[in-house]
């Protein structure tokens, strides 16, 4: 059975994002999955959302999974048009 290695990547900057120690996915990540890790939430101001997932096979038989994440945009009720969306 192949071993999976997960890398979290900021979808906008391409830099690797590091979650809290001991972080693990309970199930394979899929697009629209929300990540509620404390380190990730501190970076983005709220949960991150999985944008896309790419797998590649390593030379040693492991499978590297790049999980591209982004901040969540929420629709909120505001008086001005600019206040109707909040990026967390």
Image (spheres, helix red, strand yellow):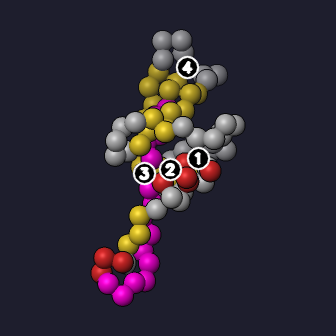
How far is disc 1 from disc 4 in space, using C-alphas? Answer: 26 Å
Q: Mark 3 points at which residue?
A: 70
Taking the spot 36% from the left edge, 37% from the top edge, the residue there is 14
Q: Name the residue under label 1.
A: 39
Ranked by sequence position, the earlier of labels 1 and 4 is 1
Ranked by sequence position, the earlier of labels 1 and 3 is 1
Q: Is residue 14 left or right of residue 69?
A: left
Taking the spot 37% from the left edge, 78% from the top edge, the residue there is 84
**Was residue 74 drawn as part of the magenta stretch in this picture?**
yes
**1 and 2 marks in contact (CB < 8 Å):** yes
How far is disc 1 from disc 3 in space, using C-alphas? Answer: 14 Å
Ranked by sequence position, the earlier of labels 3 and 4 is 4
Which span is picked out in magenta? 65-80
Q: Mark 2 points at which residue?
A: 43
Q: Residues within 10 Å of mark 2 (few under 14, many from 20)?
A: some
Taking the spot 50% from the left edge, 33% from the top edge, the residue there is 7
Q: Residue 34 at what x, y percent from top left?
A: 54, 55
Taking the spot 59% from the left edge, 47% from the top edge, the residue there is 39
How far is disc 2 from disc 3 in space, using C-alphas? Answer: 11 Å
**1 and 4 marks in contact (CB < 8 Å):** no
Residue 34 makes an appearance in the image: no
User: How many numbered circles does the render carry?
Assistant: 4
Badge 2 element: helix
Q: Mark 4 points at which residue?
A: 62
Badge 4 element: loop
Residue 27 lies, with reference to residue 15, above or below; the image says below
């Amino acid at each position: 059975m192949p071993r999976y290695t997960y890398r979290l990547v900021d979808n906008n900057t391409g830099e690797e994002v590091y979650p809290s120690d001991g972080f693990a996915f309970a199930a394979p990540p899929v697009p629209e999955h929300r990540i509620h890790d404390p380190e990730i939430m501190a970076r983005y101001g709220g949960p991150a959302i999985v944008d896309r997932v790419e797998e590649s096979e390593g030379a040693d038989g492991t499978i590297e999974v790049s999980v591209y994440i982004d901040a969540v945009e929420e629709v909120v009720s505001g008086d001005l048009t600019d206040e109707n969306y909040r990026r967390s």
